Image (cartoon, helix red, strand yellow):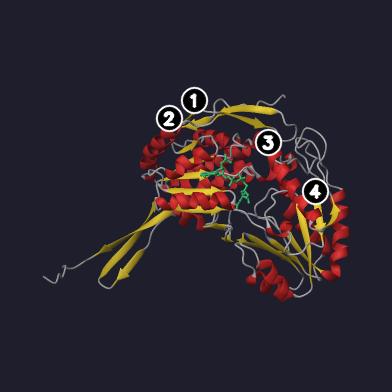
């Protein structure tokens, strides 16, 4: 392979790459070929200790800097990321298997947006003056201290930036642990931040599986944990963080509804359903995997969907004309194949796809099931792969109740030309991130996150500042103190 994916060392701590070869070996596999493209070591207790002590040391000084100075560094890092977008996209494609036709547009670019946005906000993080009769009070917005970020494997660059940018803007330090499946990209984020002038120790990246994450979350010197991952992991991490009463952000999974009414623009609705099920080979937490289609247009919808899926270009993700790549790993492919088998066994109608694609890579065909009913496993559980379930409906109130009949609440979408209905329906759907005549947009300006089991807190937007800072209240008495004795 012409492209060197092996990083200088496994971890980036206190401003430099470091290695401890006594840590267990982690092999990084390129999902398109199954080839091992890098060998890293899991963080040992010594590496974890260095990440924590350097983070705490650096944070004290960083918090004392002016916000505009912190922001300038983040915005410089955003510029470097954009300049290197091509190389970062190639690395993201190797790490995840997502095609270059995606990574060139939504990974380093989205990370750069977060760095730019929160860099811009850093100088505006103030408290307020509160008049209290003759006395008065004021609030001070303070950083939380040392934050830990734990990433999923689907968007390694984006997640590293979505967590790092607001944390750093608010004056915190961050230790980021990427998923062991995709450990490469976050190292580049750390490198770029330090090149942009970030003082050593403020953004440390250490590798490892759940054990390393557990050690970080359980350490009393850590003040906040932000996880992007599955609901079961979220429950474990939330419980562990609660032991130390730590702040948390939980961005977890979903089984989101996408409702297509009979008056929808058919091609737009089909396009939304494609984006909401097959982008990143279906490995997107907010995907609208329960597609409720009005019975009167169901067959037309399925026909148009099958036609458009027929033109998907599946293949080498480094070929920029390819728009559908492999699953991230053989184990994730097997999980998805198991769900496809369950869909068939439960009697759903296979409209297209359903099979593995022969070869060394972890490819599965884009798969659509129709005539899915609410009780089928493929309509209830998050699959996290390219499997769309199409369900029929006839009545608005009924579809809203069915859409909400899930323990998840990450996203929801509606396609209709009736603007009153669009807002009425969205108003009743229980989800944090919603879409009208669109699906899966995630600009940094809008809050992103879920309700119910899909999460706690929000990423992006001004709201994220609330999750990486806390208010100190100060009461100021102008006169004498009147004590009872
Ligand atoms: P996991 O929940 O398996 O892992 C998430 C991260 O947590 C990984 O870095 C993992 O390490 C780490 N981890 C696992 N166990 C622990 C533990 N006990 N303590 C601390 N850290 C731990 O998620 P996946 O990586 O499999 O990602 C897929 C899931 O992520 C899907 O359910 C998806 O819905 C969700 N997701 C949610 C998003 C959102 O914003 N809401 C966005 C993207 C994905 P390691 O993997 O190395 O073991």
State the residue at coordinates (47%, 55%). Answer: 467
Task: Using the numbered discs, state the Cα–Cα distance from disc 4 to disc 2 in whole angstroms.
Answer: 44 Å
Q: Which of 460 and 224 is in front in this view?
A: 224
> Is there a contact, CB below 8 Å, between mark 2 and mark 1?
yes
The answer to which of 356 and 49 lies nearer the viewer is: 356
- Label 2 sits on residue: 46
Ranked by sequence position, the earlier of labels 2 and 3 is: 2
Q: Residue at x 81, y 54 (%)?
A: 344
Quadrant position of the C terminus in the picture: bottom left
Residue at label 4? Answer: 366
What residue is disc 3 on?
86
- Seen in the picture, residue 221 relative to 257 is either above or below; the reply is above
x%, y% of residue 129? 34, 64
**Considering only order in the chain, which callout, 2 or 4, is on the residue closer to the N terminus?**
2
Name the secondary structure under disc 2. Answer: helix
From the top left corner, tell me how far across and down residue 57 is, in percent.
37, 37
Q: Is residue 136 left or right of residue 484?
A: right
Q: Do the residues labelled 3 and 4 touch (CB within 8 Å)?
A: no
Question: Which residue appears farthest toward the front when viewing the image?
Answer: 345
x, y percent for residue 92: 66, 37
Q: Is residue 441 left or right of residue 363?
A: left
Tell me if label 1 and label 3 are in contact, CB under 8 Å: no
Query: Looking at the rendered structure, which numbered label has been put on residue 472?
Result: none
Q: How far apart are marks 1 and 3 (CA)?
A: 30 Å
Distance Cα–Cα, label 2 vs label 1: 8 Å
Which residue is identified by label 1? 20
């Amino acid at each position: 392979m012409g492209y060197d994916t092996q990083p200088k060392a496994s971890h980036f701590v206190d401003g430099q790459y470091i290695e401890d070869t006594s840590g267990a070996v982690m092999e990084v596999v390129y999902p398109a070929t199954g080839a091992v493209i890098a060998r890293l070591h899991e963080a040992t207790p010594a590496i974890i200790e260095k990440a924590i002590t350097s983070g705490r040391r650096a944070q004290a000084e960083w918090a004392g800097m002016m916000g505009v100075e912190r922001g300038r560094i983040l915005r410089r890092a955003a510029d470097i990321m954009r300049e290197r977008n091509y190389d970062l996209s190639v690395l993201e494609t190797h790490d995840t298997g997502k095609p270059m036709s995606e990574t060139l547009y939504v990974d380093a670019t989205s990370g750069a947006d977060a760095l730019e946005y929160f860099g811009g906000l850093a100088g505006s993080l103030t408290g307020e003056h509160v008049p209290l009769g003759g006395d008065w009070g004021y609030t001070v917005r303070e950083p939380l201290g040392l934050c830990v970020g734990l990433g999923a494997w689907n968007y390694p660059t984006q997640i590293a930036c979505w967590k790092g940018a607001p944390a750093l803007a608010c004056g915190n330090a961050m230790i980021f642990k990427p998923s062991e499946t995709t450990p490469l990209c976050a190292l580049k984020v750390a490198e770029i931040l330090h090149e942009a002038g970030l003082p050593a120790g403020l953004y440390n990246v250490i590798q490892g599986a759940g054990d390393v994450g557990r050690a970080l979350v359980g350490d009393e010197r850590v003040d906040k944990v932000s996880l992007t991952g599955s609901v079961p992991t979220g429950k474990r991490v939330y419980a562990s963080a609660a032991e130390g009463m730590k702040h948390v952000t939980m961005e977890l999974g979903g089984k989101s509804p996408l409702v297509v009414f009979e008056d929808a623009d058919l091609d737009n609705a089909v396009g939304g359903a494609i984006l909401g099920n097959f982008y990143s080979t279906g490995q997107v937490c907010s995907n609208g995997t329960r597609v409720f289609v009005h019975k009167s247009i169901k067959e037309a919808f399925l026909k148009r969907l099958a036609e458009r899926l027929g033109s998907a270009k599946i293949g080498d993700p480094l070929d920029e004309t390819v728009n559908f790549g492999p699953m991230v790993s053989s184990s994730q492919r097997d999980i998805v194949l198991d769900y496809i088998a369950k869909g068939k066994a439960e009697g759903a109608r296979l409209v297209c796809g359903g099979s593995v694609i022969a070869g060394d890579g972890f490819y599965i065909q884009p798969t659509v099931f129709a005539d899915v009913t609410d009780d089928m496993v493929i309509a209830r559980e998050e699959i996290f792969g390219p499997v769309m379930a199409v369900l029929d409906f006839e009545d608005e109130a009924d579809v809203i109740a069915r859409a909400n009949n899930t323990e998840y609440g990450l996203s929801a979408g509606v396609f209709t030309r009736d603007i009153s209905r669009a807002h009425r329906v969205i108003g009743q759907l229980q989800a944090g991130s919603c879409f009208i005549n669109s699906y899966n947009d995630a600009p940094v300006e809008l809050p992103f996150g879920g309700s119910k089991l899909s999460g706690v807190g929000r990423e992006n937007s001004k709201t994220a500042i609330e999750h990486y800072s806390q208010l100190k209240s100060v009461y100021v008495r102008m006169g004498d103190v009147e004590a009872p004795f």
